[in-house]
Amino acid sequence: MQELVERELVKLLLDFTESEREVLDEQQWSRIRRLLRSRNADLVVAALHALEVAGDWKALRDVDRTKSKARRGADAHRIRDAAKSCTARIVERFLQDHEQWTLVRPTHAPSVASNASTLPPNVKTDG
């Protein structure tokens, strides 16, 4: 029975789309992250896929832990590759979502004369 449930869960997770990102609550995302501890490699890879498609930065620690625990064999290789791809996409999504936090600094200091029109009337400039 558990194998049947896991197979169906794998299918569901592999069909994840970005729109599920807003539908699931924090507890459901936590359960998906918990699937990364499974001994079923297909389930782990499917959970990584769901996190890659729609997960947020909260999954990074769990994804990294999963990647480092995958040691040897074909399953470990699949898990490491899926975890690397997942990490890259989560970081990319985080940076896109927080682009407005980027500090923009001038490449050179403006001259005082160029700011003369914005200075109060009692400030004199050399120039």
Image (cartoon, rainbow, N blue to C red):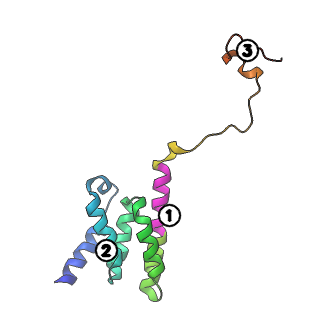
Which of label 1 and label 2 is nearer to you? 2
The amino acid type found where label 2 is placed reads Leu
Residue ID for mark 3: 123
Quadrant of the rendering where the C terminus is positioned: top right
User: Depth check: 61 or 24 in front?
Assistant: 61
Which residue is tagged 1? 88
Give the magenta-colored segment's residue range.
85-96
Q: Residue 35: which numbered mark, if any?
A: 2
The amino acid type found where label 1 is placed reads: Ala
Residue 31 coordinates in the image, percent (x, y): 28, 68
Mark before the other along the chain sequence, 1 or 2: 2
The alpha-carbon separation of the residues under discs 3 and 1 comes to: 52 Å
The N terminus appears in which quarter of the rendering? bottom left
In the image, 119 versus 21, the foreground residue is 119
In the image, residue 103 lies at what x, y percent? Answer: 59, 42
Question: Pointers 2 and 3 in contact (CB under 8 A)?
Answer: no
Check if residue 76 falls in the magenta segment. Answer: no
Q: Residue furthest left?
A: 1
* Vertical arrangement, residue 28 with respect to residue 106, above or below: below
- Residue 76's place in the image compared with 83, above or below, is below
> Which label sits in the foreground, 2 or 3?
3
| Residue that lies at the very extreme toward the top in this rendered image | 121
Q: For the point 35% across and 78% down, which residue is it?
A: 37
Report which quarter residue 83 is drawn in: bottom left
- The span from disc 2 to disc 3 (Cα, nearest Å) is 66 Å
Cβ–Cβ under 8 Å for marks 3 and 1: no
Tell me where residue 126 appears, x and y as whole percent.
83, 18
Q: Which mark sits nearer the N-terminus, 2 or 3?
A: 2
